[in-house]
Amino acid sequence: MLFFGLGGLFYVSVLLINAVAILSEDRFLARIGWTTAADPGFGGARDDASIKARMINLISSVRTLMRIPLIGINTLIILYEILVP
Amino acid sequence: MQRPGYAAPAHSPPLHHPVPQHVSSVPQLRSPPPPVPPSQPASGYGYAQQPQGGPSGPAGGGGGSYMHPAFGGFMNDSTAQMGVQFGKTAMMAGQEYVEQNLNRFINVSAIKHYFNVSNSYVVNKLWIVLFPWRHRPWSRQQRLSNNGQEGYYLPPREDINSPDMYIPMMALVTYILLSTLLAGLRGAFTPDLLGYTATSAFTVVLLELLTLKLGTYLLSISSSSQLLDLVAYSGYKFVGVILTLFLSETFNRTSLGTGIGGTGGWIGWVVFLYCFGANAFFLLRSLRYVLLPDQGSSVGAVGGAAASYTVARSQRSRRTQFLFVYSYVVQFAFMFWLSAGTGAEGGKGAEKV
């Protein structure tokens, strides 16, 4: 009863996470400047507190974490769309 | 071995082996028959007590007739009693196992804290949600615990500002039922409308939670409030949505407004805007202590003091902006979706399937 209308939302979220996962690190994000700082300053606080740094962190962690499960989820969705009329 | 005056049932042969004289404490599964002589602890075991003579015989037979005769014949077997004992122990062990595993997934005591409400609390809280302007002190009261932990919040029974889960849960169920009822009155009821409404309501709660979590992460707010607090705060908007739906439908039926139900018609819009404003104000005041913890109370001062040194002025203004945006814009979108989305969801879902 609860999961009935949730299919569309699930598809939208999977598509969005796909979009985040295929962002290329060196071709796209380096051009914008959204790469993580390779050499954090040792003496002071990290630059982690700004919004931009945290967003960059979030994007890179989503990419690292979700690349492989997304392959599986996408395969399942493709199979479901092909086999179920 | 036959007692005088006792009529043995046809299918229960008289037992000749010695039966244990002690009384087992296995509880009876049926209600005991009322007129039980005090010499017998339970009427089923009357058969086992040999020294009881004639007077207890007819009483035992009379007591046995209250129950199913096979039940009385079953219980006086010693192996059957052992089997019952074993079953009881096994069931209790299984129950403990289930409870232990359940406690690992759901924190039951934390949930119990949120349902610790009283009648006056519910009434006053609903009053605050709908008319938040008159309420003066908004901070949650804390109390230092005795066993050395940090201060914990008072339960909703004693603190009017503490969020509870009772009102949001009741409001959620009422919202689902009410919107389905209104759809039925409109003639557009299908049984999966219940599922759609439930799904959309849960989606709203989930999206709000995600937004709040994302906001706290991006703005590096180290909030000490629990997850269920945020769920509870996001559930208070259902009260306003219920009021909007009910009032607009009532007035639209009596032809005071124009258009269909939901937020159609000017009176529906007025009620909706008022409820939205009240909810936004309520959230603004309540979430101030969650999202801007450096303005909070002094019990969490140890963590709060360290955090406030690293909070710059720009961060504070950014957090306040986030709070404003969240309270007003996001809530407007969600409340509008909830109060106007019942007919649309049904149609959209039907053609999708």
Image: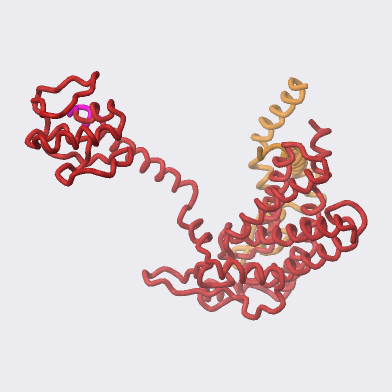
> Does the segment drawn in magenta span residue B80?
yes
Q: Which residues are magenta?
A: B77-83
Quarter of the figure with the N terminus of chain B: top left
Which of the pair B181/B133 is nearer the observer? B181
Q: Residue B215 vs residue B10: left or right?
A: right
Which image quarter: residue B333? bottom right
Picture residue at 70% right of the left edge, 40% below the top: B195
Which of the pair B183/B172 is nearer the observer? B183
Which of the pair B248/B225 is nearer the observer? B248
Which of the pair B14/B316 is nearer the observer? B14
> Does the segment drawn in magenta span residue B60?
no
Query: Where is residue B143 shown, x and y percent of the image?
Result: 46, 74
Q: Residue furthest right?
A: B258
Q: Is residue B174 visible?
A: yes
Chain A is shown in which shade?
Answer: orange
Quarter of the figure with the C terminus of chain B: top right
B268 relative to B184, above or below: below
A73 relative to B228, above or below: above
B60 relative to B7, above or below: below
Which image quarter: residue A3? top right
Query: Where is residue B168 shown, x and y percent of the image?
Result: 63, 58
The chain letter corresponding to red is: B
